[in-house]
Amino acid sequence: MQPLFLPLNTPVKIFPDPTRVRGDIVAVGDNLFPDTIEAAYRSGCFPWPHEGYPLLWFSPLQRAILEFDRLHIPESLEKARRKSLLRFTIDRSFPEVITACRTASRPNQEGTWITPDIRSAYIQLHHRGVAHSVEAWDREGNLVGGLYGVDSGGVFAGESMFTRASNASKLALLYLIDHLSERGLDFIDIQQLTPHMEALGARELPRRLFLSRLKLTQNKKLCLFPSVTS
């Protein structure tokens, strides 16, 4: 089955089933209604803009996850965590975090997939309590690192990170893992495997196995972000 074309002017409540599509791309269409995005994540899909194409919606045949019981923290990062003076918060400055991710310099990459429309849509998701951020602050109260992602029905899907100070984004990730683990989650959906995540213990699963694990975890009805303001 080929990717499906999404309606452009109507929110999609039920997203196409990824298992019925042969490749990584499940659907096509510039439909960034909050309902559409939320339905996509809950079905195991996510939007990923590519210049020159309509908005593409992916559910990769190989999906990367970071399981907490396989987490490997390098000795240097553990040492940095023990000595860190950074303060971490959740959902304190979502618009600033996604903007910083959008403008962050990324070696070997041209531009960013976080377009103005994507930024606006995810801020709307944040206001709905679906998209969340972790912030790292220095002693002067400056935002020096962070990340954001989406709660896809009790499973956190990480989207992007940024750092302005040594190890700030990595320590923000460890803070998030501690937070999610306390609430019963045992893995993060990281979508694509990167060298940094692989070094932390991330691995890839075939799409069918990922979707099965996603559904099993969603059935637990975990509350990942119960009005956190710390």
Image (spheres, rainbow, N blue to C red):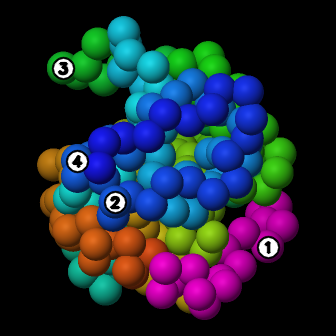
Give 176 or 213, whichever is nearer the viewer.
Answer: 213
In the shown orientation, is residue 94 left or right of residue 217? right
Q: Amino acid at mark 1?
A: Pro
SS state under label 4: loop
- The nearer-to-camera label among 2 and 4 is 2
Q: Which is closer to the viewer, label 3 or label 2?
A: 2
Task: Report whether 83 appears left or right of 63.
Answer: right
Q: In front here: 84 or 18?
A: 18
Q: Which corner quadrant holds the C terminus? A: bottom right
Query: Upstream in the sequence, badge 1 or badge 4?
Result: 4
The image shows residue 91 at horizontal and vertical percentages of 73, 51
Give the residues in magenta: 215-230
The amino acid at mark 4 is Gly
Q: Is residue 50 visible?
A: yes
Residue labelled with disc 1: 226
The residue under the point 45% across, 75% down is 214
Magenta part, dominant SS: loop
Please say if 57 is above or below 74.
above
Q: CA distance from mark 4 to mark 3?
A: 25 Å
The amino acid at mark 2 is Arg
Q: Which residue is mark 2?
A: 20
User: Of marks 3 and 2, which one's residue comes earlier in the chain?
Assistant: 2
Q: Residue at x 73, y 27 (%)?
A: 9
Q: CA distance from mark 2 to mark 1?
A: 35 Å
4 or 3: mark nearer the eye = 4
- How far from the left and from the top, in percent, is residue 142? 66, 33
Q: Nearer the viewer, mark 1 or mark 4?
A: 4
